[in-house]
Amino acid sequence: MRVLIIGGGVLGTMHAWQAVERGHEVVQLEREPEARGASVRNFGLVWVGGRAAGAELDTALRP
């Protein structure tokens, strides 16, 4: 199956990587030649939610 991913930021790249890991053929499109889009400016908005207190650190540190 061919998957089209629009965006080369943090989320687009992670989705593309996961699709490749699952055996899909991936086409990823990005409009800018270098990183300067929303993911670069807004790392503070990319966070894990819905976990118990303190669980984020344990999740981040797992091997």
Image (cartoon, rainbow, N blue to C red):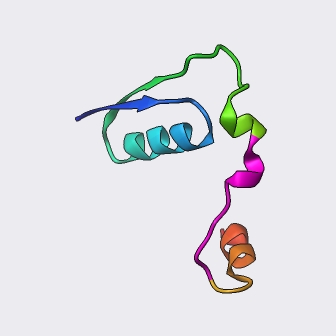
Q: Residue at x 53, y 30 (%)?
A: 7
Query: Residue 51 vs residue 41: left or right?
Result: left
With 10 as the anchor, is 41 left or right in this view?
right
Spot occupied by residue 17 in the image (x, y as percentages of width and height): 48, 41
| In magenta stretch: residue 54 | no
> Residue visible at 74% across and 43% down?
42
Q: What range of the chain is rendered magenta? A: 42-51
Residue 48: x %, y % from top left = 63, 66
Return the residue found at the far top: 33
Question: Residue 27: where, in percent of width, then height?
Answer: 39, 25
Tell me the quadrant of the picture where the C terminus can be found.
bottom right
Name the residue: 64% across, 86% down.
52
Relative to 15, is 56 above or below? Answer: below
Residue 29 location (% of width, % of height): 47, 22
Q: Nearer the viewer, residue 48 or 26?
A: 48
In this view of the protein, which residue sits in the foreground, 56 or 24? Answer: 56
Quadrant of image for the N terminus: top left
For this view, does 5 lie left or right of residue 54?
left
Could you tell me which residue is drawn at 56 percent across and 43 percent down?
11
Instruction: Using the image, determine if residue 32 lies above or below residue 62.
Output: above
Q: How many marks?
A: 0
Report the magenta stretch's main SS.
loop
Identify the image quadrant of residue 35: top right
